[in-house]
Amino acid sequence: MTTPTLPDLPIFRTIADAAHELGQPAYVIGGYVRDLVLKRGSKDIDVVTVGDGIKLAQAVGKRLPGRGRVSVFKNFGTAMLPTEEAGEIEFVGARKESYRSDSRKPEVEAGTLEDDLARRDFTINALGLSLNAEDFGALVDRYDGMKDLAAKTIRTPLGPDITFSDDPLRMMRAIRFASQLNFDIEPDTYDAIARNKERIKIVSQERITIELNKIVESPVPSYGFKLLFQTGLLQLIFPKMAQLYGVEKVGQHAHKDNFYHTLQVLDNVAAAGGDLWLRWAAILHDIAKPASKRLDPKIGWTFHGHEDKGARWVPGIFTDLKLPLGEEMRMVQKLVRLHLRPIALSKEIVTDSAVRRLLFEAGDDIDHLMLLCRADITSKDHQRKARYLRNFDIVEEKLREIEAKDHLRNFKPVITGEVIMETFGLKPSRQVGELKEAVLEAILEGEVPNEWEPAYQLLLARGESLGLTAVARLPQH
């Protein structure tokens, strides 16, 4: 593993000059150094100084063209300085920390560089590069972080029980780094996560979810979820997902393990370039299967209605996990509700009306839905899988044809409730809803196009069949 070299950026010399003038040794520490070794893109820089971090940041800011704008956070003893060449640089004084058992917020006091490195979460994040004149650019590696990077290992600088008990969020971070980097967690560190898992309860849901989302966005997210499950953390932070695990067998009837199936679907979506919310749809697409499971003695295990129940659960799950409750949640909910529909179409003769209904209900999320459904085909029977995928090609071609002709993505029927009430002199009522649904059904079945004149004539005829008399003949709206 090649020793990291500081990029030739003027800002590093500027920091070195300011630190020298103040008599405060300074170092680039942490993720920036780690990512230099791994040749990963990383912009934000953490600078630790043995002294006053805010004072150093202000001294550096004065040296920058236009006098850089320093943001000071006195409560945390830190300062932030944005730069064009190196992104945001955070300055902090070297510190040592002590923790109470009921909080992950430490009591902080000034410390040495050794104190500061010891408080880091993992050895790979305890690497530093000197910004001091006498050894500018020299590597600081007190805990063999380079060795662990070469071995692709996540390990804590101090005893892992101390590290995880002090700040239990580090258990999530260990799994997140393992998942992001495809590293192993060192055995003692892994065992300590399992031993200290209950401590995660003192961490806020918001912080847990930030780490969880980074696991979801990993290149192969199943790796992180398997670690969460095997250490027992998943059962505490997301019990509904953990409940997918296991196979129940009665006589000759057994079902697939829905936990590992879900992880395969998630990996498939990730491999196809799915974004965070499409990945959440993959996680939740079968979430209600345990609650919907029934044994039919003739055909085996069934999960009837799990897509509708799962969709109803989505808002509650997003609320519990402190995920956003707006457009992202609604898209996930829609995909969970509809995820069986394209699969059903792929097994049948695809009718125009069935495709129209799918386009109408999926709207602009139809492409996401089709990607999720392709990912959901995880059969180990290669011939069966190939047959499903060929049928999906037919469904998608039909979708393109119908969409080009009828423009049904997020379409709005030309006949609205207001039109119906004005035509027949009605107030809001069940009859208005029935007529509106009748016109919509006729459009989706292809009986009439979604155009004013034929749809309005259909409305008049349906109204007449219900004994209604038009009190007004409306012009095209």
Image (cartoon, helix red, strand yellow):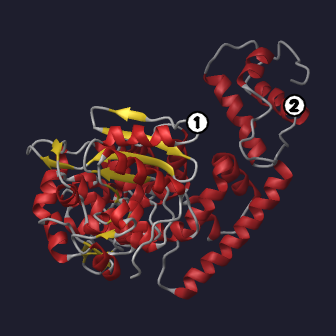
Three-letter residue code for mark 1:
Gly
Q: Amino acid at mark 2?
A: Gln
> Which of these two is toward me, 150 or 82?
82
Up the image or down, 391 lies above or below 22; here it is: below
Please, is residue 366 above or below residue 373 in the view?
above
Going from the N terminus, do you reach mark 1 or mark 2 first? 1
Tell me the distance, in whole angstroms, between the alpha carbons under discs 1 and 2.
Answer: 71 Å
Report x, y in % for residue 342.
61, 62
Residue at x 46%, y 53% (from the top left corner)? 44
Q: Residue furthest left?
A: 101
Give the structural element (helix, strand or loop) at label 2: helix
Q: Which mark is residue 457?
A: 2
Mark 1 sits on what residue?
A: 66
User: Where residue 66 sits in the image (x, y, percent)?
Assistant: 58, 36
Query: Residue 308 vs residue 108: left or right?
Result: right
Drawn side of residue 344 relative to residue 47, left or right: right
Q: How many marks?
A: 2
Quarter containing the C terminus: top right
Q: Quadrant of residue 108?
A: top left
Number of residues whose C-alpha sits closer than 10 Å to that of mark 1, classed few (under 14), some (14–19) or many (20 or more):
few
Q: 42 and 272: which one is in front?
A: 42
**Is label 1 in a helix, a strand or a loop?**
loop
Graded by Cα atoms within 10 Å as few (under 14), some (14 to 19) or many (20 or more), the crowding at tag 2 reads few
Q: Quadrant of residue 3?
A: bottom left
Residue at 28% from the left image edge and 38% from the top image edge: 77
Using the rendered image of the protein, determine whether residue 296 is visible from the camera's viewpoint: no
**Between tags 1 and 2, which lies in front?**
1
Question: For the point 29% across and 54% down, which residue is it?
Answer: 25
Residue 228 x %, y %: 27, 64
- x%, y% of residue 421? 73, 17
Query: Circles 1 and 2: CB distance less than 8 Å?
Result: no
